[in-house]
Amino acid sequence: MNTTTRISTAERLGRSFGRGWRGYLRREQRVARWLVTLGVPVGGAAAVLWIVKLAVLGVLLYSAFWLALLLVFAVIAAGVMGNAELDDEPQTEWRTGPLGFGLYHPDGSRIDPHDPDAEA
């Protein structure tokens, strides 16, 4: 029996997410230091980074809004098409009626050419 404990998939994903987040923070600090070396005050560098973050968040929310709106219209259109009667006319059908088997209109009259006297 194997006694080594294995980490779960959730823990593995959490660790990967944590490594990615730490990498992002290191890059953000590097950009902030670079802005300071260019002569931007520390508060200005932080403000620039926040403005960039908010702009990215705004673009993502804007895109998500239009995608959600497109999805809502698609669902509504599918519902309308599912409930729509495409053909309001009563359908003719092949059946056995008073004049024998043939193509009949829903009111009972036979449509296809038929001569009852020609039957032998």
Image (cartoon, rainbow, N blue to C red):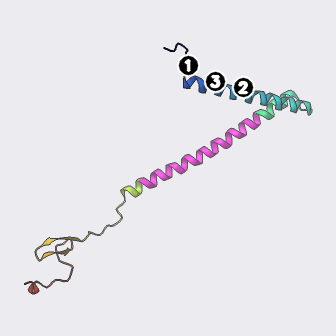
What secondary structure is marked by label 2?
helix
- Determine contact: label 3, label 1, CB under 8 Å: no
Q: Which residue is drawn at 34% across and 62% down?
A: 85
Instruction: Please tell me whether residue 63 belongs to the stretch shown in magenta.
Output: yes
First of labels 2, 3 by sequence position:
3
Span shown in magenta:
50-78
Q: Residue furthest front?
A: 1
- Disc 2: which residue: 22
Question: Mark 3 to mark 1: distance in Å?
Answer: 14 Å
Q: What's the amino acid at mark 2? A: Arg
Q: Which residue is drawn at 37% across and 59% down?
A: 84
- Left or right side of 5 for 95: left
First of labels 1, 2 by sequence position:
1
Which numbered disc, 2 or 3, marks the residue closer to the eye?
3
- Disc 1: which residue: 6
- Determine contact: label 2, label 3, CB under 8 Å: no
Q: Of residues 104 and 106, which is closer to you in this image?
A: 104
Above or below 78: residue 18: above
Q: What's the amino acid at mark 1? A: Arg
